[in-house]
Amino acid sequence: MSRRDDSPAAAGEHADERAPRGPYPPTEAMLAEPVPPELQAAQAERLRKAWETPKGWRYWSAVNNSEVGVWYSLTAFCFMLLAGLMALMIRVQLAVPENDAISADLFNQLFTMHGSAMMFLFAVPIFEAISILILPAMLGARDMPFPRLSAYGYWSFLIGGIFVMGSILFDVAPRAGWFMYPPLATEEKGPGSDIWLLGLSFIEIASIAAAVELIVGTLKCRPPGMRVNIMPLYAWYVMVVGGMILFAFPPLIAGDFLFELERSFDWPFFDPTRGGDPMLWQHLFWIFGHPEVYIVFLPSIAIAAMIVPTVARRPIVGYSWIVLSAVGTGFLSFGLWVHHMFTTGLPNISLGFFSAASEAVVIPTGIQLFAFAATLMVGRVRVNLPMLWIAGGLAIFTAGGLTGVMLAIAPFDFQAHDSYFVVAHLHYTLFGGMVFPVIAGVYYFYPFIAKKRLSDRLGKWAFWLIFVGFNLTFLPMHLTGLLGMPRRIYAYPAGLGWDWLNLLSSTAAFVIAAGFAVFLVDLLRPKSRQPQIARNPWEAGTLEWSHDVPEEAWGARSVPYITKRYPLWDQPKLVERMDAGRYYLGDAEEGFRETMITSVIDARPLQVQRVTGPTWKTHGAAIFTGGAFIFPTFHIYWPAILCGAIAVGFIIWWLWSDTARPPEKEMKDVGLGLSLPTYASGPKSVGWWAMWITMLGDATAFASVIFGFFFYWTASPDFPPPEALDPVAWLVGLAAAAMALAWALTRAARSLNRAGRLAAARGALAVAPAATLLGAGALIFSVLHMSPTAHVYPAIMWAIMVWVVVHSGVGAIMQLYCLAGSLAGKMTPRFDADIWNVALFWHFHALSALVACAVLGLAPMVLT
Amino acid sequence: MSARHDPQRRRDRPAERDEERRAFREEAESLVRITAAPTIWSGHFLLCYCAVAIACAKAGAVPGWLTGGLLAASVAALAAIGWVGWRAFRQWNVTDTGDFSNPEGEAEDRHEFLGHAAFLLAIISFIGVVYVTMPLLLVEGCR
Amino acid sequence: MRLTGAATAAAAAALSLAGCAGRQSALSPGGADAAALGTLFWVMLGGAVLLWLAMNGMFFYVTRVNASAMPRRLANGMVIGGGIVLPTILLGALLGWGLSILPDQRQPDDGLTIRVHGEQWWWRVEYWPEGAAAPVVSANEIRLPVGERVGFRLDSDQVIHSFWIPSLGGKMDMFPGRETYVSLEAEAPGVYRGQCAEFCGESHAWMAFEAVAMPPDAFDAWLDAEAGAAAAPEGGAAERGAALFAREGCGACHAIRGTGHVGQVGPDLTHVGGRRSIGAGRLAATPEAFAAWITHTDSLKPGVRMPSYDHLSDADAAALAAYLAGLT
């Protein structure tokens, strides 16, 4: 260990000592060499032991993607069924005019919960669930890079979901619509709106956690050789959708943050009598809400992109076109949000921009469908049941897409907006673009997941019932809407021409329900007497169909070297060699769970990642995080703070005991003569990438709060109000200086530690938290004289302050964590992933703190 | 990384580091290249929306110079996207290889694939900018 | 059973109010804007049906009719032609058309503006003829002259509503603390129905109104009459009703110009008997409906601020109803 500076040369030297060694890529001769059978058996036994799923009640401590993914999918599916039951109740009430089967209040709770649950508890989570379940197998990875994060996400989702869904049993469910427009939602009596805000924020955070994991999984956990131009299209979609979640959810979280501050403490962000503006919520909500639609749609299209080549029995036509379409849709979908606000009286020319972008997004969406058609055209098609569902989905989705083209024309939307036409449109896009492909995916991947098959006959019954029922329910709604029926009305008078249309819709809704019942029966009926399935029943070409039948928990017996888009079709002997353990990581000599980390673009092997195994720590963390979100719903704050502290404790315990520990040996032979490091820090480690991606999301949320500040300035002629008090300038300046110092110390600690100057590094890490707290304190005192309930100007200043102070608290804990790690020998000059990640956090935090100080300190002078 | 990673060859460090650095730069560059055109679209879109929103909120009208400026921005954005697209087309190199799908797990195919994807994204972004420019020409005023 | 009786009366009143289907239909235009949007819709629908058939016909053909392998060149052509060229042209043309008719509904009015203020769940209405110093105050009904572009200045009390008369044109949201504007032009005399289109709370379903398009002369005459004070209705029951109105404290919330009642919480009732509906489009303005409304307010419009006067005897309710129905 040299005591040198953190020059690139020094860093390079460390990197070199831990650089991969040995031949890569493997030659055909190396791959052709057989593995002795007794060695194979011994290796398999060791792997099996390392990846053993816990038995009995300990089963629930599992964190493996194949367990968590199944729980996640089933839970999301249950929430979908519950939300579907709510829809049936809605249809019963609307079957005839002047009906009083359900009270107005209950009806409002039902449609609010139907929408919220379908979006937040089904559509987004099911994408993450299915991806967690199948993505590692598509990539020949053993598991996701952070299994415990998936488990934590799952338990958070379960707790939050039950809490939100359960509220309807106590007649306290949210009732202001799934879009929660203030002032209606802010003025709502009872905890309904709080349940929505806090319960769903909790779930959104779990969603972001899963997105981070999926992005890192796609970027870093691909098998050696799987360059970006040959990864399964599903992985491309996961990456795009993960990125969209990262930029779409944070604005909503920022909105939730402001909204809950208004609900709990009467800070008037959306109250026009005190300078607030309900339009800000609409912007933040739909900046989330429209990308959300594509977040839901793209993964389902990704499933279609896996099924279509299998059916056509040839590679997809237009791989690059589909990648373009996914990436293009991802970008364009962020320029559509105002088309949900066409009737809010925004300037026509603004509407024009969003109208234009809404039409432009049709093009990439259409390209995907044409690429599928082209694939089927040049292939020798053999239609199977999943393809039937895909075809049905496309028929429905194209209709929804075409009505979308109409709605994007602003003047037409003036008529159709908030009418049943839109209800029909959105169900056509979501059923066709999401529900049908997901069910197709269930039929397609069921042999992979359960090692059993679903019934073709029941599947066809379910399909035709749902398909016919769907069209009979929703096709008439286009007309109902144009005949003037608005959405979200619990009753309507007779004689406006809506009666028979509604009766038809309500009746047909039960046909859909019958179809789902058939599907459910097929899914749940016992299948233990079914003969063992073929390993690749659809004769597909992608890697997940190299799975073991009967099931093994290790994911891939050995991690293959991939050179083709459809390796099972085009790489002969691949499966045989995987099974023999011929490829990488065919053994678990040390008894650890391990997976390969490769480079982002070309998937060169970089590292062996030890992934974590079963634990209960994540349950503790999830339960207490839940407490921290759920208690404030009832305006109980001390237990919430306590829960938050305990949750932080659990998370620190979990990180401390199981992540970034110095390994027992630095390099490990992974097979085929290749030796890889077992530890990485900085840009080479998955943890650093996860931090980077998380902070990108966090920065987006912060930017949304800052956007709020400038939104008020744009929207209101007297913002800041002329007589308003401003933050104390010198305290803001002090805060900026202290934060900059804390950042510099953290950054210096990283270099000093790397250079082996431990005392100096520890000194910096000891002083840094003090500087952090000084900065946070100065920021608090700079706005303390302003009353946040009086006007939105002080309120938004306070909100920015709260945001920065909370992050400072996290930053200080991180600094102390590194200090403790250094003192305890967990973090050393060689094994320094922790300080790299913390320094990265601080780059972002310092930047946002300085922006906050600029807004607090400079904006009042500039804007008045 | 290659066979040169054999322990006896580890003295050969600077060249190796160069190679790694080049590889990393290429990773970063290809990410930039593939997202460049849609990023230009986003920038142009946000510029148009924000400028008009502020003009309408603060002045109640979109002054002619602003419309003119935004039209100029549209032309600049189209030119930039065209340039990105042209470079991507060169990278795709289809005229020489005749390969439309680049399906092999080789560096060359990966390189050309990224060019192809970036080229297609440039086309979409170009259309996007043209569409977003239409309201500037067809819709007047703030009402 | 009184409740059933009231409910039946309400149902009957609602039926008679509904009249012909299509009064709230965007597809039966009674105004210039709705007509333009109707044309837009029919054209787009035709295009959409054709495209849907082409797209799904192609899928059907390649999977069911001709499942064998077809030439690659054809497939490439289809991705380029169908995926990029055709949609770019079609969508561009459609966008151009849409943008060109976008400003129409916010054209300046011809002089008359009507200020509509959304409440939970009814409408305050003020008529501002050109140059007027003070408005003509009404509620829950819109009357407008045929052939004249009328401006609507919209805002709201507490929550967001949306003002929508499908047969005349598109909708516009109504915000607290911010004024929005839409203009509409009726082309044919007729009675249309408007309804709140933005979810606004428990009885969002029952926030509607009648919109009556009248020949200009008739409109002017009506507006003159509407500007005047209420004429006390004659007859024993109606006079007893007027006394009951005072005794029950109705005037604390409702104004009737020309009497001492000046409450501003609820709708202005000066000419309530002359309106086509009561309770914001809830019931036809018949004496029975007035009685049902007064005694069963909460079941007819859940969550409404007006209490149900269910302690009134049938005779009292009828008297009150006679008074109100007589306020023409």
Image (tube, helix red, strand yellow):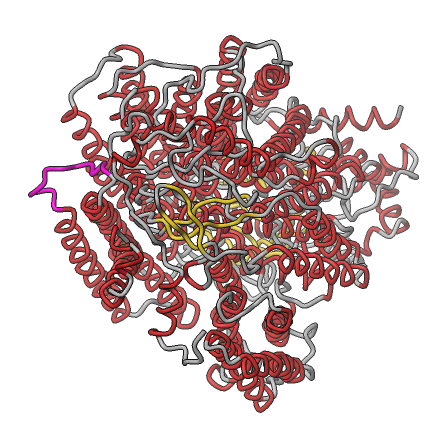
**Quarter of the N terminus of chain A within the rendering:** bottom left
Q: Please, is residue B67 above or below residue A523 in the view?
A: below
Residue A282, image x, y percentages:
53, 55
For residue C198, above or below residue A29: below
| A66 w.r.t. A755: above or below | above
- The front one of C133 and A681 is A681
Please give left or right for residue B81 compared with residue A311 in the image: left
Main secondary-structure element of the magenta-colored stretch: loop
Residue A771 or residue C242, whichever sits in front = A771
Left of C125 or right of it: where is A407? left
Instruction: Name the residue located 51 percent from the left edge and 64 percent from the top edge.
Output: A833
Name the residue at 55% across, 23% down.
Answer: A450
Q: Residue furthest bottom?
A: A730
In-image side of B93 versus B133 (left or right): left
| Residue B100 among magenta residues | yes
A539 vs A641, nearest the viewer: A539
Residue C124 in the figure: left or right of residue A46: right
Q: Looking at the image, can residue C192 be seen?
A: no
| Residue C321 point in image, percent of width and height | 80, 38
Residue A393 to residue C304: above or below? above
**Foreground residue among A175 and B67:** A175
Whether residue C28 appears in this view of the structure is yes
Residue at point 26% right, 13% down? C67
| Residue A673 location (% of width, % of height) | 35, 45
Q: Is residue A575 magenta?
A: no
How many marks are shown on the rendered structure? 0
Q: Quadrant of residue A494?
A: top right
Q: Position of residue A806 (x, y in %)?
A: 64, 69
**First to last magenta residue range:** B93-104
